[in-house]
Image (cartoon, grey):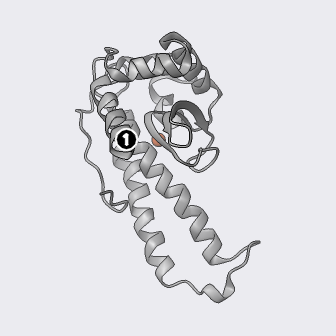
């Protein structure tokens, strides 16, 4: 069971292909760890909140709940992103067949996913939508903006500048190619199987 207040270990050494150790160190040790700490702080503050001042324009309760959703999604998405890195990029497994079924072909899915990467200001996600039982690509401009309720992330690409700017400058396309070179499709398949089979 997930504990938002607990750091999830990195499953790979920080030396990826083309994505530097410096980038991963800042991303994991500083930024991701920072979200965990803020989650703990928000939960502590929520315990003490004065609910009699609840208000939709501004209230401490409202602001904390908004940032709680921001922080929870930041944790979920970063863990999903780090989980699938450290592989050799070799595309394999059952999920490929489902991608072909839901998107027409693997190439059509890949073209859509990479294009969404260029459109996104935050995240690009391949997720399983429990509402219709299909895989879906979507983008989020920040952790809690434009996600689809009932969709579970499987393949998550961080498109915030901190994920690529040190190594690639503004060249998002090269970062996206490097991201795919480092994917572990065995883990992506395991995630897909766990999400779909445990919940259907
Ligand atoms: Fe990030």
Q: Nearer the viewer, residue 139 or 35?
A: 139
Residue at the front extreme?
A: 200
Local secondary structure at mark 1: helix
Residue occupying the point 40% across, 49% down: 32
Residue 126 against residue 104 in the figure, above or below: below
Q: Is residue 172 visible?
A: no
Q: Is residue 63 left or right of residue 183?
A: right
Q: Position of residue 179 (x, y in %)?
A: 42, 23
**Quadrant assignment for the C terminus:** top left
Q: Position of residue 110 (x, y in %)?
A: 51, 16
Residue 130 against residue 55 in the figure, above or below: above
Residue 116 against residue 68 in the figure, above or below: above
The tally of labels here is: 1
> Pointer 1: residues within 10 angstroms few (<14), some, or many (20+)?
some
Q: Position of residue 172 (x, y in %)?
A: 55, 22
Q: Which residue is mark 1?
A: 195
**Quadrant assignment for the N terminus:** bottom left
Q: Position of residue 84 (x, y in %)?
A: 34, 32
Q: Quadrant of residue 12?
A: top left
Residue 144 against residue 91 in the figure, above or below: below
Residue occupying the point 56% across, 38% down: 132
Q: Is residue 121 left or right of residue 166?
A: right
């Amino acid at each position: 069971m997930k504990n938002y207040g607990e750091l999830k270990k990195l499953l790979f050494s920080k030396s990826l292909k083309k994505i530097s150790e410096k980038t991963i160190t800042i991303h994991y040790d500083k930024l991701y760890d920072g979200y965990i700490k803020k989650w703990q702080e928000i939960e502590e503050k929520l315990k003490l909140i004065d609910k009699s001042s609840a208000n939709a324009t501004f209230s401490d309760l409202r602001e904390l709940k908004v940032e709680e959703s921001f922080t929870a999604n930041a944790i979920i998405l970063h863990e999903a992103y780090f989980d699938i890195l450290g592989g050799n990029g070799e595309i394999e497994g059952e999920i490929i067949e489902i991608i072909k079924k839901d998107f027409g072909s693997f190439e059509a899915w890949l073209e859509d996913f990479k294009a969404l990467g260029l459109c996104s200001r935050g995240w690009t996600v391949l997720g399983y939508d429990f509402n219709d039982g299909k895989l879906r690509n979507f983008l989020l401009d920040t952790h809690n903006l434009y996600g689809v309720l009932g969709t579970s992330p499987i393949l998550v690409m961080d498109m915030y500048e901190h994920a690529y700017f040190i190594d690639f400058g503004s060249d998002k396309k090269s970062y996206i190619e490097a991201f795919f070179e480092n994917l572990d499709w065995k883990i992506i398949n395991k995630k897909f199987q766990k999400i779909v089979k445990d919940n259907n």
